[in-house]
Image (spheres, rainbow, N blue to C red):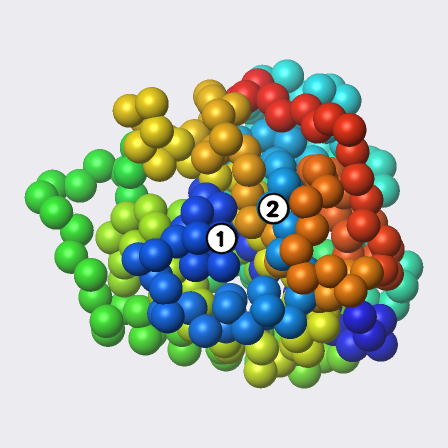
């Protein structure tokens, strides 16, 4: 990893590990060249877990390095003030990076108000129409229809935003894609489009400075459930992790948690490992 160049933490909401061909998915095989290449060049982690299968709790874990039970937040209600401890964005700023968050504008009135753990100087970019509302979060009359026109408009919007951000010098960017990217219709239907977004990111970030994961997964039909937040079953808590090559390993089976992002990104060749991890269901 080159600490003199910009860094990207590239995640997707409700991102199950078995959506990607590099983790065994057959449906998308041959349709995710960017994920495939970065997995082949980097290290693929097989036992990476979220500390919580719900967004706000997962963000708190990712950016504070603390498990949900270590925070004072015990209910899913807006918090009154930002997290006062050190964050991953503060660490990036100490190392000379300007911090940025890119996500859908809807997150400003939902998960952001329930986490606020992004450092005072981090710039947040809420993009309009990045997401397609689906599932138990949204009700629709009739069936949603895929739209190539919306897909292309979304990709163009993303490229313009990332081009502007990266032109400002060394940046640390957390780019968080929604459950479903606009133009697609349901969980797991947008993986090829997700790959195209990653392809755009590779124009502006070196491969050795891109870290790929999710905040949590979803039940994906297991046990008759499709949502997340109230189950710590494997599909909801085990998530992808692809990093630049560490310790010469193509595949790593060490047990990690998303409270370890500090060491994963800024720890050089270090691979943190835990005997156990703790994952809490929603508050």
The reply to whether the C-beta atoms of the residues labelled 2 and 1 are less than 8 Å apart is yes
Q: Position of residue 21 (x, y in %)?
A: 43, 59
* Tag 1 secondary structure: helix
Quarter that holds the C terminus: top right
Q: Is residue 269 above or below residue 262?
A: below
The residue drawn where x is 61% and y is 36% is 50
Residue pictured at 49% horizontal, 53% vertical: 23
* Residue at the spot of label 1: 23
- Residue 78 vertical placement versus 244 (above, below): above
Q: Is residue 187 left or right of residue 81?
A: left
Considering the numbered disc 2 on the image, is that residue within a helix, a strand or a loop?
loop
Residue 280 located left or right of residue 217? right
Numbered circle sitting on residue 46: 2
x then y, percent, for residue 96: 87, 68
Query: Do we see residue 174 in this rendering?
Result: no
Q: Horizontal and vertical percent for residue 57?
A: 61, 31
Q: Residue at x 73, y 65 (%)?
A: 245
When asked about the image quadrant of residue 65, the answer is top right
Quarter location, residue 203 = bottom right
Residue 212 pos. (x, y %)? 60, 58
Q: Nearer the viewer, residue 10 or 111?
A: 10
Alpha carbon distance from label 2 to label 1: 8 Å
Of labels 2 and 1, earlier in sequence is 1
């Amino acid at each position: 990893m080159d600490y003199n160049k910009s860094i990207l933490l590239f995640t997707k909401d409700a991102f199950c590990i078995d959506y990607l061909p590099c983790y065994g998915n057959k449906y998308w095989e041959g349709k995710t060249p960017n994920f495939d290449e970065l997995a082949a060049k980097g290290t693929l982690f097989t036992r990476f877990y979220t500390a919580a299968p719900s967004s706000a709790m997962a963000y708190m874990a990712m950016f504070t390095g603390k498990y949900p039970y270590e925070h004072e937040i015990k209910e899913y209600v807006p918090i009154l003030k930002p997290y006062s401890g050190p964050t991953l964005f503060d660490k990036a700023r100490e190392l000379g990076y300007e911090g940025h968050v890119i996500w859908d504008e809807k997150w400003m009135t939902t998960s952001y108000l329930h986490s606020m753990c992004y450092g005072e100087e981090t710039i947040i970019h809420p993009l309009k129409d990045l997401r397609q509302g689906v599932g138990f979060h949204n009700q629709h009359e009739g069936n949603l229809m895929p739209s190539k026109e919306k897909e292309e408009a979304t990709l163009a919007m993303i490229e313009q935003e990332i081009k502007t951000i990266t032109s400002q010098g060394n940046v640390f960017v957390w780019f968080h894609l929604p459950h479903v990217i606009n133009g697609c219709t349901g969980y797991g239907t947008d993986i090829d489009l997700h790959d195209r977004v990653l392809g755009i990111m590779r124009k502006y970030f070196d491969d050795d400075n891109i870290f790929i994961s999710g905040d949590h997964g979803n039940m994906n039909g297991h046990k008759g459930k499709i949502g997340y937040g109230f189950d710590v079953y494997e599909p909801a808590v085990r998530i992808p992790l692809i990093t630049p090559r560490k310790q010469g390993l193509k595949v790593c089976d060490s047990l990690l948690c998303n409270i370890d992002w500090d060491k994963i990104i800024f720890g050089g060749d270090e691979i943190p490992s835990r005997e156990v991890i703790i994952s809490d269901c929603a508050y």
